[in-house]
Amino acid sequence: MKLHISNGHIIDPASQLDSQQDLFISDGRIVAMGDHANDFTPDQTIDASGLIVCPGLVDLNARLKESGQEHTATIESETFAAVKGGITTLCIPPDTDPVIDTPAVIELIEDRAKKANRTMVLTMGALTQNLQGELLSEMLALKEAGCIGISNGLNPIKNTLIQRRAMEYAATLGLTLFINAADPWLQSQGCVHEGTVSTRLGLGGIPEAAETIAVARDILLIEQTGVRAHFHCLSTSRAVAMIAEAQKKGLPITADVSAHHLHLSEHDIGNYDGFSHVLPPLRSTRDREQLQQAVRDGVISAICSNHQPLDNDAKLGPFSETTPGISGLETLLPLTMKLVDDDELTLQQAIASLTCNPAEILGIDAGQLKVGGKADICIFSPNSHNECQPQQFISAGKNSPFAGWLFNSEVLLTFFNGRVVYQKQ
Amino acid sequence: MTNNQLTDSGQLRHFLTIEGLKKPLLTEIMDRAEQFSSISNRQVKKVPLLRGKTIMNLFFENSTRTRTTFELAAKRLSADVMSLNISTSATTKGESLLDTLHNLEAMHTDLFVVRHNQSGAAEFIAQHVAPHVSVINAGDGCHAHPTQAMLDMFTIRRHKQHFPDLSVAIVGDILHSRVARSQIQALATLGVGEIRVIGPKTLLPTNCQSLGVHVYHDMENGLADVDVVIMLRLQHERMQGALLPSAREYFNSYGLTEDKLQRAKPDAIVMHPGPINRGIEIASSVADGPQSVILEQVTHGIAIRMAVMSMALGAQSEQHETHS
């Protein structure tokens, strides 16, 4: 199959390309870029006039619920949702059921992903056995089976000595450690940011210190052990400041933020809106501003979906009894592009944080458009005006607080290995 | 924020929280209660106001006093009333809470009185009941207990003339208290001059000042020249989780004794939402003393609940008529 994508506005932050060019694709690879390609007779030409052509998105943090909760969502349903959102590489945390602490689970997930055959699905191996924070997992076996990094998911390791040894062992193997920073004791009582909203609504608060203490501890251990580390889903400005400081010292630390933390704050909980129940919690408006600033400064180099599809019952109940999480695959690009529309980010910053930056964090060959590279491509319109309707999501999870939001960006076509895996009807 | 407690014409449809309600409405509740309170002194303690209406008390959390006064209030208004104690273990999932609700709704209930251990539960239920059903919050988690707050305002009004001239101190576990949150909102709405809260930092919520109160950590200064002292109940489980060292130390610091009460104005009244822990948050001599109005509060609870029930169901029928 030979494809010619013509007249698109190509954005490729990795090569700092930002111009109108044509793309030529053959056998799943980009064979030429520019005005024309020699000896190229396309089977199909796609007119991308007025559209943005960028690398397929790389999402560092998405839960697909398979294996373990297939009644909620499956790799089949969620990879379809991903490509509707322009995402062609997904990274799933180890807290599946069973946990990704044996090669067998990695094989199972890869099998299902191959069957769906729409996106690259990468797995994070468990740092400790069954994520219990006590015994190290067989990280070498996991690495050889193909896991892209190592993480203890949403189960922070309480024992500092074990955290240190896990880091040392991961560093030995050259594995990147992905961290959801949370002090388990400070977090345990709460479901919302500890602040004026928790005080008004009488909900258990999760103090800022739940994140900052964990980040501080881990930065010190990263410095000591030399492990390469990445912090997922930061929510507080002070944690960002500490990470900026550590980066300045040259420590091998990167970080991401979820798209929803760049848009929402504790006040969006309003009158107990369970759709705004997430972990880490939505913080103050000041935190939100500082998170945006950190993306501009590059301290936070990636934006992720923190996708968590849930069934309808999960959000039906008094706030603290609802399950935290947002179905985020289909809003990742429009929410990030909204920051461009609002002049918070440049187009290059926005696309970089969704493509080449997360790919670099993972150390994979993706997230860029280059001759000879894989043709994972997202084509979207930056000027479509549509209302976010979670009930229309392809994802099995319709849990989104963004219902009724107006988005200007909409994915029209997604290519995976040079093949059309999504086309807007 | 839209206020779903009110009908299109501004009448009380649900009573979930004091937040967002205006002063005239709070005054109306107290005026109504004033009319109803005389009924309790009659030979025949009944009016036919809610004859034929069905009221369901749903208590997902134990309560004796509140449930009893709601039941009595309903009976004095001639409604049919049922009280159900539902253990929360049977409804740990929201879906079964909704199932329970819809089943009871199918029995043509007109009004639910709900107590639940989770903040926001009454709001959640109000969002999911049929349009002709009203919900009264009888306490949700640490969030709100609006009828308790109104009976407290009613009690204050009976003893003190003018809300703006008053200084009111609320003492104890503000962090976990739905009563305190509702009281603070009611006092503020009624224009009370100064609202103080007194307690150790472990029992005060973060940014407590954002509730519109002055914060004190000692009784000496906190009680100085106040007109009303409201003591809160201290749950025994607060000793766990390192919130307090011991009941004895708490009583020494924050328990209301005759000595400490001397700091308040000579005619200050002492209130407590009950049930009281003698010797933990209040000395018996104060609880039973001349300044205590604690038992009056209980009596007023019936009148206030009659007022709120009649207003909510009255607004419902009015709305129903205008729409049909």
Image: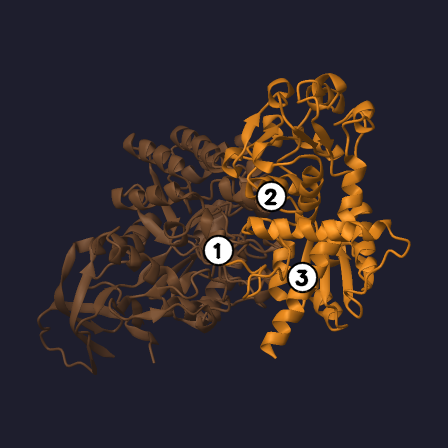
Q: Which residue is mark 1?
A: B1
Residue at horizontal 48 percent and vertical 67 percent from the top: A75
At label 2, counting other C-alpha atoms closer than 10 Å, the crowd grade (few under 14, some 14-19, many 20 or more) is: many
Residue at horizontal 49 percent and vertical 55 percent from the top: A276
Nearest-to-viewer mark from 3 and 1: 3
In percent of width and height, residue A211 lies at: 47, 38
Same chain check for tags 3 and 2: yes
Q: Along the line of sight, which residue is nearer the eye, A234 or A249?
A: A234
Task: Name the N-terminal-most of marks 2 and 1.
Answer: 1
Chain that is orange in the image = B
Q: Is residue B222 above or below residue A297?
A: above
Q: What's the chain of the residue with tag 2?
A: B
Q: CA distance from mark 3 to mark 2?
A: 18 Å
Q: Is the C terminus of chain A in the top left, top right, bottom left or bottom right quadrant?
A: bottom left
Badge 2 element: helix
Q: Is the N terminus of chain A in the top left, top right, bottom left or bottom right quadrant?
A: bottom left
Image check: A207 left or right of A238? right
Looking at numbered disc 2 in the image, what kind of residue is underneath it?
A: Ala
Q: Residue furthest bottom?
A: A43
Nearest-to-viewer mark from 2 and 1: 2
Q: Identify the mark at residue B312; answer none if there is no mark.
A: 3
The answer to whether one can see residue B304 in this image is no
In percent of width and height, residue B270 lies at: 73, 30
